[in-house]
Image (cartoon, coloured by chain):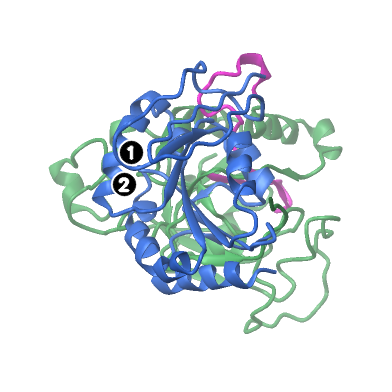
Chain colours: A blue, B green
Amino acid sequence: MVSSLRTVATAGASLALLLGGCGEPNAPVSAPRSIAGAAVEVVDLQGLEAFVHARKGRPLLVNFWATWCGPCVAELPELVAATRPFRAAGGEVAGVCLDLMAPGYEVDTVLPKLPAFLAARGIDYANLLFSEYECGPLGDRFGFDPVLPVTLAIGASGEIVEIHEGRADAARFAALAERARQGS
Amino acid sequence: MRLDMNRSFLSSTLTLFLLAASVAAQGVEPPAPPNVQDPQPQQEERQEPQVVRLGDTVRATITLTDIDGIDHSTEDLAGKIVVVNFWSTRCPIMRGWESRYAAIHREYAERGVVFVTINANVGNGELQREGAARGAPAEPTEAEAKQPYPEIRAYLRANELPYTVLVDAECKVADLLQAKTTPDIFVFDGTGKLVYRGLIDDDLRQQKGEKAKHYLRDVLDVLLDEQKAKEFEPFETRPEGCSIKRPAGEARRPRRGGR
């Protein structure tokens, strides 16, 4: 099984490119591209693991969402606002767009639209576009059922300390951020 | 045999009666034995347990009302293989499986399997009883617009779907089964035991060809074969899809993972 990781880094930092991993590839590997606007990186499962691992030492919230998922989009403004103190104190928030779960969605069609989509909603944290069609391996790796939206609270030690499946409100995001800050 | 051929008129509203010891909730492994002979006295007010897990046998009487206002009771399902699917008109994941699931529905309903299609999306307006059919691939006809649940009616018509859609307006059945997604499949054997939960198949985009695993079809084929059914071991796969739109989300502890 061939796997791909494409990085479309725009805001500066880019991750090391890795080849190999799990799941089905969605398209042939292409050279990294840049898109003006918010940073959006395209990652497969290994790329996502590398992204998360690179943030070890800091509390982290990872929000899995999709543009076609109403509750996911609805909760984004609250995620942004509720986690500002957390981020100001050194915590990180990352969005992982799982649009490709749904048939008809491809990297080449989703990626160009994401920066404007994110900008319009005031998203000021890192976002990744998951390049694999299947999310079972993703759920296996991180220990959740691919039920959108999902938010993981990860402590500085790297342990996932809480999983919230379904839409969250500002208070819930703040609580998840606090759980991540406290760690296990 | 379709569920709508076994309509019960016991109640005009959704009712859920959990009988004491009606639901064995002893965990997934090992499966709890069927509780058919359980002589324990019934306590109708008892609150626990209220979750059905793989291997558990449901002896509860559950009644749900369909979009036409007709009640359907589990009392009518005795001895039948039953497929329960939590379903949505708006979820692109469910839509991706829709035609194949509908084909399975048609094919196996002819062989006596009962299909129960439940919409429990109380939190996104999908179960709106009147008004515009938001998200449906077809505008409701004038007649549909005057009937309850115009969005569901328009969607069923546009896609020529054979489902009888039951409304889980309080998410009680979704909670009982711990259903998470649309779709989320639950298969019960003729004794009422939950023997499979999870995916329809593992090839949503239909790219795997012969490597695809057709879980639901395979489970039904085994259950319909008297000899094979005796050796069938319950199993589950990880459901994928849109979250069921409950009024409020639920958090839980992680099973595993980390970085």
Residue B150 is left or right of residue B36, and the answer is left
- Judged left or right of residue A98, residue B201 is right
Q: Measured along the vertical axis of the image, is residue B258 above or below residue B1?
A: below
Is the C terminus of chain A in the top left, top right, bottom left or bottom right quadrant? bottom right
**Dot 1: element:** helix
Label 1: chain letter: A
Residue at mark 2: A118
Q: How many marks?
A: 2
Q: Do the residues at discs 1 and 2 belong to one chain?
A: yes
Name the mark on residue A61.
none
Residue A13 versus residue B211 in the image, above or below: below
Q: Which residues are magenta?
A: B184-212
- Residue for point 59% across, 25% down: A24
Q: Residues within 10 Å of mark 2 (few under 14, many from 20)?
A: many
Q: Position of residue A55 (x, y in %)?
A: 60, 52
Q: Quadrant of the N terminus of chain A?
A: top right
Q: Amino acid at mark 2?
A: Leu
Magenta stretch encompasses residue B191 = yes
Q: State the image quarter where residue B214 is shown.
A: top right
Q: Chain of mark 2?
A: A
Position of residue A134 relative to residue A142, above or below, is above
Q: In screen coordinates, is B110 left or right of A122?
A: right
Between residue B2 and residue B22, name the one nearer to us. B22
Q: Residue at x 63, y 24 (%)?
A: A19
Reading the image, the residue beneath label 1 is A114
> What secondary structure is found at the residue carrying circle 2?
helix
